[in-house]
Amino acid sequence: MTRLSGFKRARGAETLTAALHVSNGDATDLPGTGLARRLIYWRDVLHEGPVPEVEPEELRRIRVAFLTGAGADDHAEGERMFADRDRTLADNRDGAYVLWFEADLYDQLQIIEILSRLAGLGVPAERITLICIGEYPGIARFGGLGQLTAGQLRALPGTNARIRLSPAALDLATRAWAAFRAPVPDGLGAVAADRSAELRFLGEAFDRLSREYPSTRDGLSLTERRVLAAVAGGATDAGAAYVHAAARETRPYLGDSWCFTMMERMARAPVPLLDAEPAGRPVGPGTELRLTPVGAQVLAGAADHVALNGLDRWIGGVRLHGRDVPWRWDEATERIIHATGTPRDLVTDS
């Protein structure tokens, strides 16, 4: 190594340590790298619950209320954590940022929220560095940065995983965040079709998000169908069903507690798709599961879950409610369509 290259590496590390680092959670040993002297965790499950078009303060209130109601957070602790997170992000507006994230849907939604906020704060793109990977040499099924040692994490900024963002990337993130929060899903398809060299996992994540809309085939989201298929295939309890369903994901993103909540909805529906034992108790890893006869019909495409049971679910800014939801995922064309017959294509380029 020449003296000049050593100097450049030292300056690069110095730049990283001076920045505010942002990550999805503390399962990643960023403190152990020595690079992240200032660090905040975003910690929001944005693919679950309402994420409407409102100002950041109101969105924080809505998200804390949802996460508290779902049992994911204590209200006071959640409010404090989100307020501290938002304040720290804004207070650094004259400095640099380093974002450490992964390729899955959970992380990609956090990335676009953060980048949209930074754009709103007037932070130039060149002061934002993104470190985002979807694979790692020697790990056959990469699940996230939490699998890496502090030494492996420390080496990532010296690879092509480190990207200094451009204004175009910041603009794409802002448009994607707006599309996700819109009250109709018109803009999701354009983001899913985008191929960005900087936000290279975003299109894939939006495609996966779109498949959570109820299908024209059976009224199931992709996750619901995979859970039912796991039970039909021999998974006898909720823990095994979760493991089998997660194994089908190219990039697993859904935590087990959220999946158990989904199973509970299918078991407690007016026309249950699952039998859960013991009855009357929250679904957990040891809950025994069996497919009901109607569940088998729905899985076979002979009945429609939404028509039978209705739906009340938020996907970003869209609330899907009732038995006649206006948008569906069309398996034949692989796009979100208007649910009335010959569909109005909601995958727009604008």
Image (tube, rainbow, N blue to C red):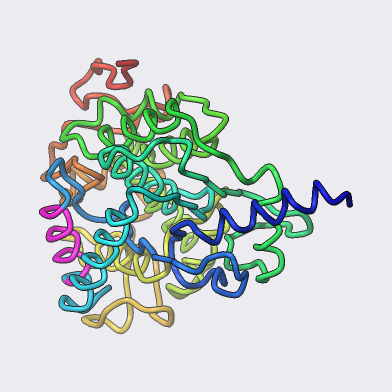
| Residue 279 left/right relative to 212 | left
307 and 156: which one is in front?
156
Which residue lies at the image location 55% right of the left edge and 39% below the top edge?
A: 164
92 and 192: which one is in front?
92
48 and 172: which one is in front?
172
Which residue lies at the image location 60% right of the left edge and 49% below the top edge?
A: 133
* Residue 73 location (% of width, % of height): 25, 75
Q: How many marks?
A: 0
Looking at the image, is 231 positioned above or below residue 324? below
* Residue 14 location (% of width, % of height): 60, 58
Magenta range is 57-68
| Residue 77 left/right relative to 106 | left
Q: Is residue 262 located in the magenta-colored stretch of the structure?
A: no
* Residue 56 location (% of width, % of height): 17, 50
- In the image, farthest residue toward the right: 1
Q: Is residue 67 located in the magenta-colored stretch of the structure?
A: yes
Quadrant that contains the C terminus: top left
Looking at the image, is 72 positioned above or below residue 274? below
Q: What type of secondary structure mainly makes up the magenta span?
A: helix
Which residue lies at the image location 75% right of the left edge and 52% below the top edge?
A: 7
